[in-house]
Image (cartoon, helix red, strand yellow):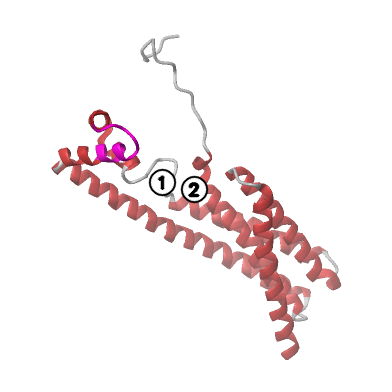
Amino acid sequence: MTTDLPPTVAPAHRERHRTEHIGWLRAAVLGANDGIVSTASLVVGVAAAAATRQDVLVAGVAGLVAGALSMAAGEYVSVSSQADTERADMDRERRELSTTPDLETEELAAIYVARGLTPDLARTVAQQLMAHDAIGAHARDELGLSAETAARPLQAAVTSAATFAVGAALPLVVALVVPDAGLVPWVSGASLASLVLLGAVSAQVGGASPVTGAVRVAFWGALAMGVTALVGAWFGAVV
């Protein structure tokens, strides 16, 4: 087998880093977490107000549909804004590279000096990178942009909507099958267990402590459901 690399250069191996998952992972975790917490809180709140099971399920399904669409729209708009900013910065760099290439080379060299290279070596590296891929070098080293972390609005929107729907389906299924008297504790318990699992798995995928992730997600989920249950019970008593 032949290779284009010089004989003294070892073939580079492909390393997969966790930052490659950051785009879809953030959207997936956010969507699933919001789906569980918001729908479980809605179900618990309505049930605490002494509503019928049908009322609880109707409210839950409405919350699932509205929440999934809201997540998709919100993610698309916010990530599109990020993509617009990235695109504007790249357009500006292209203009500067076409009008003041020498200044851009010095700017790149200054970045490498700040990172620890000697001025002469930094200038040499900057010149070689500019000759090879000027816009790529400035995107990476000046703007901090890369293909792995680039904003992808459609991916974020679809991922958030899908995971929200999956997360929201859990408390609805529990509310559908458990006895009326146990609806609030069963929905709360199953939702908290799911949040613990979600927090642990997402932290593990992201390279963080599963325990920390589980506790963090479960705490805020429990708080949301507890407050909503109190509000539902209070309004139910008042009405």
Whether residue 229 is in magenta: the answer is no
When the figure is inspected, residue 79 is found, relative to residue 237, above or below; the finding is: above
What range is drawn magenta here? 108-119
The spot of residue 197 in percent (x, y) is 71, 51
Can I make out residue 161 in this image? yes
Q: Which residue is mark 1?
A: 150
Q: Is residue 172 left or right of residue 69?
A: right
Is label 1 in a helix, a strand or a loop? loop
User: What residue lies at 75% left-to-right and 88% top-to-bottom?
Assistant: 237
Q: Nearer the viewer, residue 80 or 234?
A: 234
Residue type pointed to by label 2:
Gly
Given contact means CB atoms under 8 Å apart, are the residues at marks 1 and 2 in contact?
A: yes
Crowd class of label 1 (few under 14; some 14 to 19; many from 20; radius 10 Å):
some
The spot of residue 70 in percent (x, y) is 52, 65
Q: Nearer the viewer, residue 146 or 46?
A: 146
The C terminus lies in quadrant: bottom right
Q: Which residue is mark 2?
A: 23
The spot of residue 112 in percent (x, y) is 30, 37
